[in-house]
Amino acid sequence: MNRTLLAARNNADWCRAMCRAHGLTSHDSDVVWSCGERTPPYYPDAVTLRPEVTADEVLAGIDAGPGCSVKDSFGTLDLSPAGFVPIIEATWLYREVGATAAGTDEPAHRPADGPERHRADDPARRPADGAVSRPADELRWRRIDDAGALAAWVASWGGGAGIFRPELLADPDVAVLARYDGDTVTGGAVANRSAGSVGISNLYASTGDPADVWRGAVATAYRVFEPLPVVGYEHGDDLAAAVRAGCTPLTALRIWLNPPR
């Protein structure tokens, strides 16, 4: 499968999982994933799956009123006649199993027999001025498996109250990953498995090189699931960090919003 198609499909599967955790039913066609009810904050009401999809096909299955957002996976739509404005331009990412970190001979993930130990990485992902990465052996990664640990992860992530529900933890294809420094959550990501890929999203860290959170998240996702090509999307400095961690930039995507009024 085309790598951009693979990334878009995986992202739609993640959006479906998030909607399901909120009790929402979503739908697929050959060209678009959509949810007829308003999705949780930060999540689109539709994700396009083919570049030939039309604006009418996308908008027909959703509440396209104020507050609606659409992830135009291929940057081919013009939703401005329907009142939408573009709010984010980003780039799809792909990382082959065994890829090396940019500029090194070091694998971009480091499989381990025990808890993975790495340093780390939103707007919250960038370290404060003068921040120094902790030694890798002082940090550990694990999959969140209970509501209390999830609450700590959400508090560390910031801005996610009410979005990441405990129901997500019961989904066998979703893993909320946390990086710990002692007993404190200092970073994390979400991994979701779909046919042929693992998606990495919602990366964050309070200290360290943001590329390190990619390495730790990928290694932990491989332990939780299996080694599969990794997909995702980023923009700006976060895109550069993903490339340093061994990801290859693909094509552009655009997120459209019908502004709340």
Image (spheres, rainbow, N blue to C red):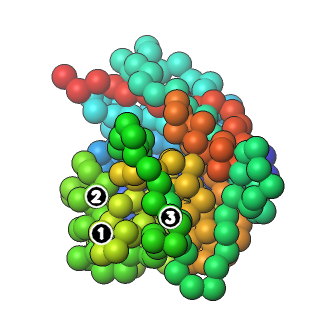
- Gap in angstroms between the C-alphas marked 3 and 1: 16 Å
Query: Could you tell me how far apart the alpha carbons at marks 2 and 1 are, in whole angstroms?
Result: 9 Å
Please state which amino acid type lies under the numbered disc 2: Ser
Q: Position of residue 203 (x, y in %)?
A: 45, 52
What label sits on residue 53 in the rendered view?
A: none
Q: At 46% from the left edge and 28% from the top edge, which residue is drawn?
A: 88
Q: Which residue is mark 3?
A: 135
- The residue that mark 2 highlights is 156
Q: Which of the 4 quarters of the picture holds residue 83?
A: top left
- At 73% across and 45% down in the image, what residue appears? 102
Q: Earlier in the sequence, mark 3 or mark 1?
A: 3
Q: Position of residue 85 (x, y in %)?
A: 40, 19
Q: Residues within 10 Å of mark 1 (few under 14, many from 20)?
A: few
The number of callouts visible is 3
The C terminus lies in which quarter of the figure? top left
Residue hosting label 1: 184
In the depicted structure, whether residue 202 falls above or below residue 192: above
* Displayed quadrant of residue 4: top right
Secondary structure found at label 1: strand
Q: Are marks 2 and 1 in contact (CB under 8 Å)?
A: yes
Mark 3 neighbour density, 10 Å: few (under 14) some (14–19) many (20 or more): few
Q: Nearer the viewer, mark 3 or mark 1?
A: 3
Between marks 2 and 1 in the image, the one whose residue lies nearer the viewer? 1
Q: Can you see residue 126?
A: yes
Q: Earlier in the sequence, mark 2 or mark 3?
A: 3
